[in-house]
Image (spheres, rainbow, N blue to C red):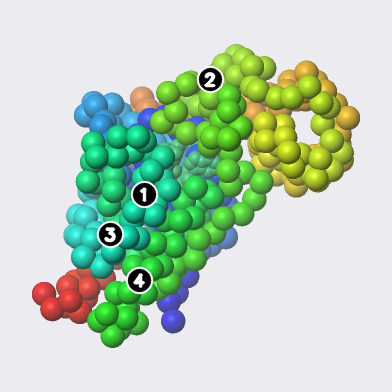
């Protein structure tokens, strides 16, 4: 009953990483090219669930917008905007705060990871983050959300909220959104620790490739990336117990648009000393045009702000009637 509509977002909580690119941006572009209606958002309200310096947040939001466009998101074909400029997100989030249960939220592993040992000192916003994320998605009646593996649990919570709302109010108003999690790079891991995901909020810069890193930085980070002394296997099964090796192969496969099996058929038997320069060359070839275009756009902050204002208007045109109808259903 719901027309296909894709929504996804990225936090302007620091510079973009290769994980964001392969797990999110590259796939957002592919989805846009498929001709589906696509809505992409810089989620600054999510970013401030942990402390953000105001000037850095403003800069990171513009840089993220530049990253979307440089990666291939066309602000005419996709709706591209900044979350805080569309108040309907926060308004629907309040309704969802009253639908979601404490017990559901307490099970969210990302909260546990981000809050760390001192959960009592985490912001209430960090705890409520998934209810806002549900509002981001459902205020557009989005049916599909391309995300990395790390967001799967939050999408399940979004489905639970939609189901409970529809049930409690006896309506069939919110769609039950599907996560779209696919490809070799749904989980790009840290270059320093194969058990942690690559993240812009990791304190170690050596753990990630930033989208703004130059060729020398990319080469150095891959050279120092943790691996093991074995050569590359010739089949994917040979990577099962080798998280660091698997990560680098996954990255290469995603960058070069090949399957892991195809990569190993070609690279099997090579030592990492031989494979890492090949990986570096591929990464530099794919990322340099993007970082160059990002740098150019960052010279035009007024142009970026105008794109975001226009995107917010288009987003509001969809979100506003859905919020109004929600209020009616709730009795407001
Ligand atoms: P970060 O963890 O870098 O702050 P966000 O929470 O803003 O990233 O996530 C933005 C998008 O990027 C989400 O779709 C998320 O699943 C994806 N993503 C983030 N890190 C990775 C990763 N290491 N591998 C694959 N996808 C990722
Ligand atoms: Na995250």
Q: Could you tell which of marks 2 and 4 lies nearer the N-terminus?
A: 4
Residue 302, compared with residue 111, is above or below; it is above
- Report how far apart the C-alphas of labels 3 and 1 lie in the structure: 27 Å
Q: Could you tell which of marks 3 and 4 lies nearer the N-terminus?
A: 3
Residue 71 appears in the rendering: no
Residue corresponding to mark 3: 102
Q: In the depicted view, which residue is nearer to us: 182 or 255?
A: 182
- Report how far apart the C-alphas of labels 4 and 1 lie in the structure: 20 Å
Q: Could you tell which of marks 2 and 3 lies nearer the N-terminus?
A: 3
Residue at the location (63% across, 25% down)?
284
Q: In this view, does 198 lie to the left or right of 270?
A: left
Residue at the location (53% across, 62% down)?
35
Q: Quadrant of residue 251?
A: top right
Nearer the viewer's eye, disc 4 or disc 1?
4
Residue corresponding to mark 1: 41
Q: Could you tell which of marks 4 and 1 lies nearer the N-terminus?
A: 1
Secondary element type, mark 3: helix
Nearer the viewer's eye, disc 3 or disc 4?
3
Residue corresponding to mark 2: 206
């Amino acid at each position: 009953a719901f027309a296909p509509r894709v929504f996804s977002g990225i936090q302007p909580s620091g510079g973009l990483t290769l994980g964001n690119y392969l797990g999110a941006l590259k796939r957002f572009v592919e989805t846009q090219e498929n001709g589906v209606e696509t809505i992409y958002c810089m989620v600054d309200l999510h970013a401030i669930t942990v402390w953000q310096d105001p000037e850095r947040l403003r800069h990171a939001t513009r840089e993220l917008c530049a990253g979307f466009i440089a990666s291939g998101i066309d602000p005419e074909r996709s709706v591209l905007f900044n979350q805080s400029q569309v108040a309907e997100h926060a308004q629907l989030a309040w309704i969802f705060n009253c639908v979601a249960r404490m017990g559901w939220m307490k099970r969210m592993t990302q909260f546990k990871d981000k809050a760390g040992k001192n959960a009592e000192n985490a912001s209430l916003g960090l705890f409520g983050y998934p209810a806002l994320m549900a509002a981001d998605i459902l205020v557009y009646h989005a049916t599909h959300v391309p995300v990395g593996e790390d967001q799967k649990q939050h999408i399940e919570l979004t489905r639970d909220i939609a189901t409970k709302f529809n049930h409690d109010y006896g309506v069939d108003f919110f769609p039950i959104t599907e996560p779209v999690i696919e490809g070799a790079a749904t989980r790009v891991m840290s270059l320093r620790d194969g058990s942690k995901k690559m993240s812009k909020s990791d304190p170690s810069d050596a753990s990630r490739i930033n989208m703004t890193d130059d060729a020398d930085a990319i080469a150095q980070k891959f050279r120092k990336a943790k691996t093991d002394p074995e050569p590359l296997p010739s089949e994917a099964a040979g990577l099962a117990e080798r998280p660091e090796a698997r990560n680098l192969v996954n990255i290469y496969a995603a960058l070069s648009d090949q399957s892991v099996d195809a990569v190993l058929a070609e690279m099997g038997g090579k030592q990492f000393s031989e494979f890492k320069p090949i990986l570096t060359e591929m990464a530099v070839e794919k990322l340099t045009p993007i970082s160059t275009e990002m740098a150019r756009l960052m010279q035009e902050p007024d142009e970026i702000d105008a794109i975001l204002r226009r995107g917010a208007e288009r987003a509001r045109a969809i979100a506003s009637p859905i919020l109004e109808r929600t209020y009616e259903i709730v009795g407001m």
